[in-house]
């Protein structure tokens, strides 16, 4: 009877049209749907009653808003024309973001049932059910009646599933361009989404995300800036940890709205995901805004909440991705300002060494990195002879790097020079650059975080440096440590 036309529905709800609140029966049915008992196999009759109740509730609202009197295809000339527009949106989204589908498909996937409903005899119900291959294959619907039957006469009936179906319903009504017609005489008609929110008690943040889904699908086909601006405005005020990460990724990757996408991430969008692919995409969004430090800190947070057996793998992949991006965009110097720990710096050092071995970077890359981190002994230790003593045919940059390293070595205090164990020296020139014999880094090198630097020389006592020390600079602490060790050696 429902598929026969909405006049039947008007007759059914005539006695309830004046009620502003749902009846006690509606409330009890919904409570039964949300209970654990409604999931049992023997509750087919209850599920059928809930399907009819939910369908009647939405149909009543449509009649009250006079949507049944609107043209079947709304602002579109025909269903083929509407279907062609939907195909253009799908192609546009695929062209902007590789592998991405329209947001309509995501909404339909949430609203579609896991399998076609059946009766006790194993036969399928007489009224239409959402297609197992995808509810989006039936979109656009031929009529309002088909939309109601396809959405609300099958599938799950709990509150979350009902809201997923409402999302598709709102998408359909707004896509058709329907306007409500229940305003009182002399007063302007409310917008469709406002009447929809009041009629079904949908949270404003949830409704804004449903509206943004249609706007982004439309913008994927026509690229109009006004739709993008409205979508960004809606998502800015409605973003939360429950918001799908796809919104932020499409804004950044598909429409180059990097700032809007980064704002969504700061609202917690995608923060609970532990998948490496999504973490890499979130890093790309932040890096597109130039937020290198924020991208690094969020990568560290992601690895901390990832599974133990995957944390190291994720850390290595994310840091290498960040380093590759900074090298590509000529901002590798920003890496020296990151608050890295010893595990993270080990990944950075390995990456730089691989780049040098592959001749994708100059041999002075790693020494300059240590030098900018304020660790001259380590810079001198890893410096190859070709960098310390460039040939005469070298360019001005190579000569400047050698002079910088020589000046840094001369500026070291005498106790710090003791960390550099001198090898065979042909002359007695104290200004010559010494060579590093032994240098081991323990649990975070000096200049990175609290740790220990242990260096053993052929004629020097063992120096143990804890860095940083409260109220004491590294050179002062090292000087006093060396002086104390020397006095103990002479006294003993």
Image (spheres, grey):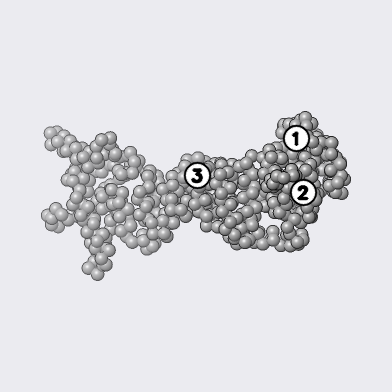
Mark 3: secondary structure: helix
Q: Closest to the observer: 406 or 12?
A: 12
Give the percent coordinates (x, y) of residue 200: 71, 39
Mark 2: secondary structure: helix
* Residue labelled with disc 1: 20
Give the percent coordinates (x, y) of residue 327: 40, 58
Q: Is residue 50 visible?
A: yes
- The quarter of the picture where the N terminus appears is top right
Mark 1: secondary structure: loop
First in sequence: mark 2 vs mark 3 = 2
Q: Residue 92, labelled with which disc?
A: none
Q: Closest to the observer: 14 or 220?
A: 14
**Closer to viewer: mark 2 or mark 3:** 2
First in sequence: mark 2 vs mark 1 = 1
Q: Residue at the location (77% across, 61% down)?
A: 78
In the drawing, does residue 328 fall left or right of residue 29? left
Q: Outermost residue toward the bottom?
A: 393
Characterize the local packing of mark 2: few (<14), some (14-19) or many (20 or more) Cα atoms within 10 angstroms: many
Q: Closest to the observer: 7 or 490?
A: 7
Give the percent coordinates (x, y) of residue 340: 38, 45
Q: Closest to the observer: 37 or 150?
A: 150
Task: Give the alpha-carbon distance from disc 2 to disc 1, as whole Å.
Answer: 19 Å
Is residue 490 shown above or below 281? above
Give the percent coordinates (x, y) of residue 276: 52, 48
For residue 391, which quarter of the picture? bottom left
Q: Residue at the location (33% across, 44% down)?
A: 448
Q: Residue at the location (52% across, 51% down)?
A: 260
Q: Residue 266, labelled with which disc?
A: 3
- The quarter of the picture where the C terminus appears is top left
Q: Residue 67, labelled with which disc?
A: 2
């Amino acid at each position: 009877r429902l598929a026969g036309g909405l006049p039947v529905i008007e007759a059914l709800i005539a006695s309830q049209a004046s009620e502003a609140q749902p009846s006690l029966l509606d409330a009890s049915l919904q409570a039964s749907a949300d209970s654990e008992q409604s999931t049992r196999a023997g509750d087919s009759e209850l599920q059928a009653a809930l399907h009819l109740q939910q369908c009647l509730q939405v149909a009543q609202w449509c009649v009250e808003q006079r949507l049944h009197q609107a043209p079947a295809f709304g602002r579109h000339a025909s269903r083929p024309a509407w279907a062609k527009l939907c195909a253009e949106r799908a192609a546009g989204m695929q062209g902007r973001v590789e592998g991405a589908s329209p947001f309509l498909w995501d909404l339909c996937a949430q609203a579609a049932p896991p399998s076609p409903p059946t009766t006790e005899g194993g036969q399928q119900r007489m009224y239409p059910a959402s297609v197992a291959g995808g509810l989006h294959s039936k979109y656009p619907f031929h009529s309002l009646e088909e939309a109601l039957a396809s959405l609300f006469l099958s599938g799950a009936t709990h509150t979350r599933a009902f809201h997923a179906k409402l999302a598709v319903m709102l998408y359909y009504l707004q896509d058709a361009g329907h306007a409500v017609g229940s305003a009182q005489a002399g007063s302007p008609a409310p917008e469709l989404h406002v009447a929809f929110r009041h009629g079904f008690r949908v949270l404003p943040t949830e409704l804004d995300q449903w509206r943004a889904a249609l706007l982004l699908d439309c913008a994927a086909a026509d690229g109009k800036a006004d739709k993008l601006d409205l979508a960004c405005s809606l998502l800015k005020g409605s973003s939360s940890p429950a918001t799908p990460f796809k919104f932020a990724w499409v804004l950044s990757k598909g429409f180059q709205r990097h700032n809007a996408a980064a704002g969504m991430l700061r609202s917690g969008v995608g923060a609970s995901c532990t998948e490496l692919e999504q973490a890499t995409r979130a890093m790309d969004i932040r890096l597109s805004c130039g937020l290198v430090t924020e991208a690094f800190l969020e990568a560290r947070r992601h690895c901390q909440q990832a599974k133990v057996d995957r944390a190291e793998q994720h850390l290595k992949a994310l840091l290498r991705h960040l380093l590759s991006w900074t090298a590509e965009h000529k901002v590798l110097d920003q890496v020296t300002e990151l608050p890295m720990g010893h595990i993270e710096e080990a990944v950075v050092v390995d990456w730089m060494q691989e780049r040098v071995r592959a001749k994708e970077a100059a041999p002075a890359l790693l020494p300059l990195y240590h030098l900018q981190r304020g660790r001259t002994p380590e810079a001198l230790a890893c410096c190859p002879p070709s960098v310390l003593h460039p040939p005469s045919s070298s360019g001005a940059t190579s000569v400047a790097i050698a002079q910088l390293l020589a000046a840094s070595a001369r500026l070291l205090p005498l106790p710090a020079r003791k960390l550099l164990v001198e090898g065979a020296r042909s002359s007695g020139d104290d200004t010559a650059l010494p060579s590093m014999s032994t240098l081991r880094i323990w649990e975070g090198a000096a200049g990175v975080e609290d740790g220990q630097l242990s260096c053993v020389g052929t004629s020097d006592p063992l120096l143990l440096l804890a860095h940083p020390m409260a109220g004491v600079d590294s050179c002062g602490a090292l000087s006093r440590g060396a002086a104390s060790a020397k006095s103990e050696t002479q006294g003993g």
